[in-house]
Image (cartoon, helix red, strand yellow):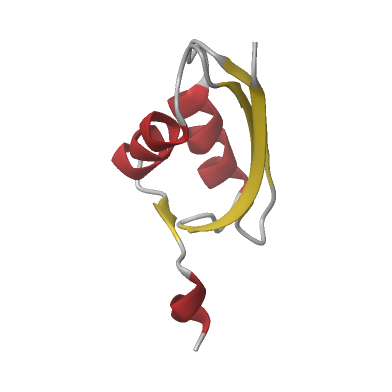
Amino acid sequence: MAVQHETFDVTGIRCERCMNRLAAALRGHEGLEFATANLAGQVTLEWDDTVTSRDVIVAKLDGAGFRQRMSDDFS
């Protein structure tokens, strides 16, 4: 098992309800070992890359309305 770990920013987290929607989008995702988010839009993930990939997890977030914020989004 090769566990990967990453923290990144997403758009769409504005309240506790948003965080619950994010949790529901990821709940039960095979290979996802750990996920947490805060109201500032930071999402931390750990996953087994022999089972799933970062791209698949980010696509699930995207499908739930959470878009990864790119570094140039801050300018």
Where is residue 6? Give x, y as percent: 65, 43
Say which quarter of the image contains residue 36.
top right
Instruction: From the top left corner, tell me how far across and down residue 68 is, in percent.
Output: 44, 56
Farthest residue to the bottom: give it: 75
Residue shown at 37% from the left, 30% from the top: 56
Q: Nearer the viewer, residue 3 or 32?
A: 3
| Residue plotted at (45% across, 57% down) | 12
Q: In this view, does 13 lie above or below 47?
A: below
Q: Is residue 46 or residue 25 the one in the foreground?
A: 46
Picture quadrant of residue 32: top right
Residue 43 appears anywhere in the view: no
Residue 55 picture quarter: top left
Tally the numbered discs: 0
Side of 67 where 74 appears, left or right: right
Q: Is residue 1 above or below residue 13?
A: above
| Image vertical order of residue 39 relative to residue 74, above or below | above
Residue at x-position 45% and y-position 19%: 52
Whether residue 58 is visible, yes or no, is yes
In the picture, measured across the screen, residue 70 lies left or right of residue 43, that is left
Residue 8 on image: x %, y %: 59, 54
Nearer the observer, 31 or 3: 3
The N terminus - image quarter: top right
Residue depicted at x 53% and y 21%: 49
